[in-house]
Image: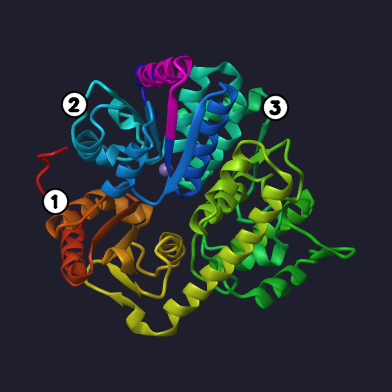
Amino acid sequence: MAAQQTSIERFLASAAEAAKVILETVQNDGFIHVFSHLDADGVAAAGVMGKALYRLDARFRIRVTQWVDEKIIGEIVADKPQLVILTDFGSGYLDLLNEKIPNVKVLILDHHQITGILANENFVQVNPHLFGIDGATDVSGSGVAYFVAKAVNALNVDLAPVALVGALGDMQDRYEQRKLCCLNEIIVNDAVATGLLKVEKDLTFFGRETRPIHKTLATTTNPFIPGLSGEEDKALAFLASLDIPIKQGEKWRALRDLTEDEKRRLCSALADHLLSKGLHLEVENLIGYIYVLTKEEPNTALRDAREFAVVLNSTGRMDRPSLGIAICMGDRGVALDEANKILEDYRKNISKYLGWVMEKPERMRELQNIYVIYGESFINEKIIGTVSSIIVSGLANSEKPLIAFANVEKEQAAKFSARTTEAAIRKGVNLGEVMRFASEAHGGKGGGHNIAAGAQVSLDKIEDFVKTVDELVGKQLRGEKVGSDSNA
Ligand SMILES: [Mn+2]
């Protein structure tokens, strides 16, 4: 899967071209509008671009939204910017951008699948897919922004850790042992070379820096551990049986605090436990690459790049992306305290939603080829993607993708989020295509990656859309192509 050197070189050349546009705009004292996606990767991308522009003493503003539409573009145009920079989205909206802002310089720094044609000399698009590099695994939106920032000024190499946080937020660690590869690996090497990152191999359970070890075990869904996942008391008993103390004095111990010997015992006991449940998982599957931000305080969420990503994601999803951006730009203190509170609220919301979904069977229905969560007016449309990701990782039939929707009353629309597993992708599922074709068939819009995608349709089209998605996934599972690719 590794890209050829030449594609990487061509990608970097296009990043340099975008950097030139930024430098020219700043030289002419142009006003720049940065416009980014609200997930962890988008917030990280906005932070990378924001810091690069700040260092240039540029006049700019940053705005973060969940999607691109006519109304938002109208507001941006009304700001009269000399340059619009879209990060972590844009490639799915080329036609719309061309129609609505044809006469302004636009940079599209994205890694999503490209739809439409770039036929405007004011537009520069930097996207790995243009060079045969997989944007789902090999570089994220913040990574694309990073390569542009680095081409603007080599000093911006210190933003490499933030770019990796974005990649991990987009779950790009899908190579063996959860390694980041290809363009992401170049960023890893930059971060290591500047002394800002240390790469270790360890148990990859989430919460390594901040979460009490029994909670880490109980909240693990990747892999899902029957008898431990979701069961804190059993996780406590499990650790007690291994003579692993859960506290050091008054302080809870996190995974990072365990000795090598304790980790070895934990690993082999987990392997035995999984085997006893009929899951043939090698211990190696529990071990993987850990990305440690060496300049961050130990036992804080920013120290572990995967935990950092969750902090950013929560600020975006809870309508406080400026906090996440400030942290990416180097702010700690008040911004970080505030972000930690937001993270708490975010977690409470997620567990409320998970409980709600599981409470009644009609809230999650199983169709022939997919599962559907009817979030309707209960689940916040900004959080439904996270809820879907958590639920899909615990599904018994992992070849069936999951789609979930929430109603956005003021737009009379339903927002769908679709998630699936590697197993389904190996069988031919591509949710980006499914969401795009199914939504277009019912007057909406959609797209994304093979493993995670989204769409929007009007409220009266929900059932028709769900039916089409079920059919299209069925087609893909049978190895048939979906839709015509006329506008790709
Ligand atoms: Mn992204």
Q: Which residues are magenta?
A: 8-33
Viewer-closest of 469 and 270: 469
Amino acid type of the residue tagged 1 in the rendering: Val
Q: Using the rendered view, name the quadrant where residue 423 is placed.
A: bottom left
* Residue at the image point whose x is 68% and y is 49% from the top: 336
Which dot marks residue 291? none
Magenta-drawn stretch, dominant element (helix, strand or loop):
helix
Residue at 51% x, 56% y is 319
The residue shown at (13%, 39%) is 487
Q: CA distance from mark 1 to mark 3?
A: 47 Å
Q: Considering the image in quadrants, where does the N terminus appear?
A: top left
Q: Give SS at disc 3.
A: loop
Q: In the rendered view, does 216 fall on the left or right side of 112?
A: right
- Residue, disc 1: 482
In the rendered image, residue 369, in percent from the top left (x then y), is placed at 23, 66
Residue 409 visible in the picture:
yes
Task: Kindly identify the amino acid type of the residue bearing the numbered disc 2.
Answer: Ala
Q: Which mark is residue 119?
A: 2
Amino acid at pointer 3: Gly
Q: Residue furthest right?
A: 249
**Vertical comparison of 363 with 438: above or below:** below
